[in-house]
Image (spheres, rainbow, N blue to C red):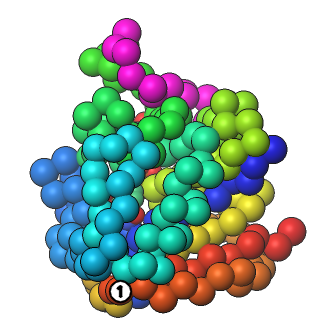
């Protein structure tokens, strides 16, 4: 079995998107600064789907080469899915995506796309993702899903791609936790250009 982990780009004040996020403003006001590191270096990294090329520092490229192919399935929330417009039918990581939602979007029913809409909760979505990921890891994305996974004790690893900007508001990664303290052990610090990759093991 692989592990269950998350990797999200976060501002120094803890936001994964700025205020007023939505399909027309995917990362919210000022949030485009969060993803600037994907184009902030001179080393090319082509995502597993082949549909996107990042230009990052050598250290970030090495991290992406290690972590992306090790991911066998993703779990995300319905807001992220809608804001990303279903990644055009294929996620850049080219793995099955389990979308936690209260209602299956009718426009995606019957379409040939690797998305499963899970209406019975995060734990079920992680269970389904683990089953298809096998020996590979499960990546959980979006704030509400990470928070629920932490509460349910499902998360083995937290990686944040920390960006030196203060967004001042928006979608906070560790809001509404309702539990704590959660002990973490730092397992990697990778300085990139415009980003520092920090990896932690969740101590149980
Ligand atoms: N910085 C980064 O690396 C990064 C990466 C990914 C996303 N983002 C950003 O993060 C933001 C989205 O995160 P978010 O936390 O606001 O939203 P989210 O987790 O993507 O989606 C939340 C929605 O998922 C559904 N949901 C969640 N838990 C559920 C449950 N237990 N049962 C049923 N449905 C459930 C609900 O939608 P319904 O009620 O409509 O079904 C809920 O409103 C966006 O701005 C996105 O662009 C940033």
Is residue 125 in view from this perspective? yes
Q: Is residue 120 magenta?
A: yes
Examine the image and state in which quarter residue 28 appears. bottom left
Quadrant location of the C terminus? bottom right
Q: Is residue 17 above or below residue 138?
A: below
Which residue is drawn at the image coordinates 75% and 42% (left, top)? 135
Task: Please give the residue where the numbered disc 1 appears in the rendered image.
Answer: 193
Q: Position of residue 12 (x, y in %)?
A: 41, 87
At 37% from the left and 80% from the top, the residue drawn is: 57
Image point 67% across, 49% down: which residue?
A: 137
In the image, 63 versus 112, the foreground residue is: 63
Can the viewer see residue 170? no
**Residue 164, horizontal then vertical, whole percent:** 35, 90
- The picture quadrant where one finds residue 90 is top left
* Count of residue discs: 1
Callout 1 environment at 10 Å: few (<14), some (14 to 19), or many (20+)? some
Q: Residue at x 56, y 50 (%)?
A: 69
Please state the extent of the stretch shown in magenta in the rendering.
Answer: 110-123
What is the residue that sits farthest to the right in this orientation?
204
Q: Pick the quarter of the image with the N terminus.
A: top right
Image location of residue 153, percent across then percent down: 77, 57
Q: SS class of the residue under badge 1?
A: loop
The front one of 179 and 61 is 61
Figure check: 175 above or below 109: below
190 versus 203 height, above or below: below
Q: Is residue 59 left or right of residue 157?
A: left
Q: Position of residue 93 (x, y in %)?
A: 45, 45
Furthest toward the top, the residue is: 110
């Amino acid at each position: 079995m692989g592990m269950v982990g998350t990797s999200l780009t976060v501002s120094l004040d803890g936001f994964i998107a700025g205020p007023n996020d939505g399909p027309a403003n995917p990362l919210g006001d000022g949030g485009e600064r969060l993803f600037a590191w994907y184009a902030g270096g001179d080393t090319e990294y082509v995502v597993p789907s082949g549909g996107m090329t990042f230009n990052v520092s050598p250290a970030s490229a090495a991290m992406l080469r290690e972590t992306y192919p090790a991911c066998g399935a993703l779990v995300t929330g319905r807001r992220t899915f809608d804001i990303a417009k279903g990644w055009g039918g294929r996620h850049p990581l080219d793995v099955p995506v389990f979308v936690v939602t209260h209602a299956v979007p009718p426009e995606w029913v019957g379409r040939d796309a690797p998305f499963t809409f899970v209406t019975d909760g995060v734990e079920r979505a992680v269970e389904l993702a683990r089953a298809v990921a096998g020996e590979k890891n499960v990546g959980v994305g979006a704030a509400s899903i990470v928070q629920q996974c932490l509460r349910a004790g499902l998360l083995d690893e937290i990686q944040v791609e920390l960006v030196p900007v203060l967004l001042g508001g928006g979608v906070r990664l560790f809001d509404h936790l309702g539990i704590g303290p959660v002990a973490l052990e730092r397992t990697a610090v990778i300085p990139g250009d415009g980003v520092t990759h920090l990896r932690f093991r969740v101590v149980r």
